[in-house]
Image: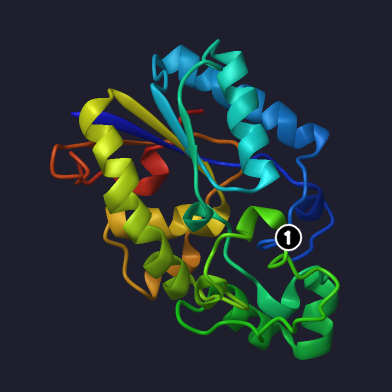
Amino acid sequence: MSTLVLLRHGQSQWNLENRFTGWFDVDVTKQGADEAIAAGHAMTAAGVLPDVVHTSLQTRAIKTANLSLREMDRLWVPVRRHWRLNERHYGGLTGLNKAETAEKFGDEQVHIWRRSYDTPPPEMPADHPDNPNADPRYANLPPDVLPTTECLKDVVERMLPYWFDAIIPDLRTHDTVLVAAHGNSLRALVKHLSNIGDDDISSLNIPTGVPLVYEIDPEGRPATDAPVEDRYLT
């Protein structure tokens, strides 16, 4: 049996500004850094000390992992990074204020874009000022895998290969694995682990900076069926 810890990055600058972030790279705020440090403290207090860490390629997840590891005196553990753990790509909504977007398109339409399992936002045009696809961290990715928009179903489909090919092997050889990622990439993983239905996943919100813990059996399945809300370290 191994322990899997899921950690959504601490508050980012665009979280604070209530903007759609997606693949655009922003840093954590002071509050976000404090949340990451508090997460490290909570993991230490619970005796949940990572042996290996997985993060996305985005600064807010990387910094959250580093601050948490520093608090645990675990900066030396191996770290693996992959774009498949990136946040959901919000397409043409990237950079827009959520309240202003709701005023423009209507609350119902924005709710569908945000929470529908299989309805993505409008695609991001190539000339969008916040288009992240030319970022050098994605330079070696084939163009056909670079999204221009995503719904949660898309995130599940691009995240699960990494779960099976990279995270499960680490769970089989290490006692504790930390995954520091994003609200939607972690929602995608929690959907898989807790077998949450397509409709029910819309109501799940993973808070920033609060560790979420699963005990995982050798087959890569949760050892218990405890509800998600009972799995947080506080």
Residue 229: image quadrant is: top left
Indicate left or right for 9 with 223 as reference. right
In the rendered image, the vertical position of residue 40 relative to residue 96, given as above or below = above
Helix, strand, or loop for circle 1? loop
Decide which of 209, 93 is in the foreground and name it. Answer: 93
According to the picture, the residue beneath numbered tag 1 turns out to be 24
Residue at the spot 25% in from the left edge and 39% down from the top edge: 169
What is the crowding at mark 1: few (fewer than 14 residues within 10 Å), some, or many (at least 20)? some
Q: Is residue 107 left or right of residue 52?
A: right
Count every numbered label the image shows and give the total.
1
Q: Is residue 23 left or right of residue 44?
A: right
Q: Residue furthest top?
A: 73
Vertical placement of 218 versus 184: above or below? Answer: above
Does residue 205 show up?
Answer: no
What kind of residue is marked 1? Phe
Q: Residue at x 76, y 70 (%)?
A: 131
The x and y percentages for residue 203 are 48, 65
Looking at the image, can residue 231 be seen?
yes
Q: Position of residue 83 (x, y in %)?
A: 53, 55
Residue at 41 percent of width and 23 percent of height: 50
Q: Residue 28: image x %, image y %?
A: 76, 40
In the figure, residue 198 lies in which quadrant?
A: bottom left
In which quadrant will I find the N terminus?
Answer: top left
Coordinates of residue 178 in the picture (x, y in percent): 43, 33
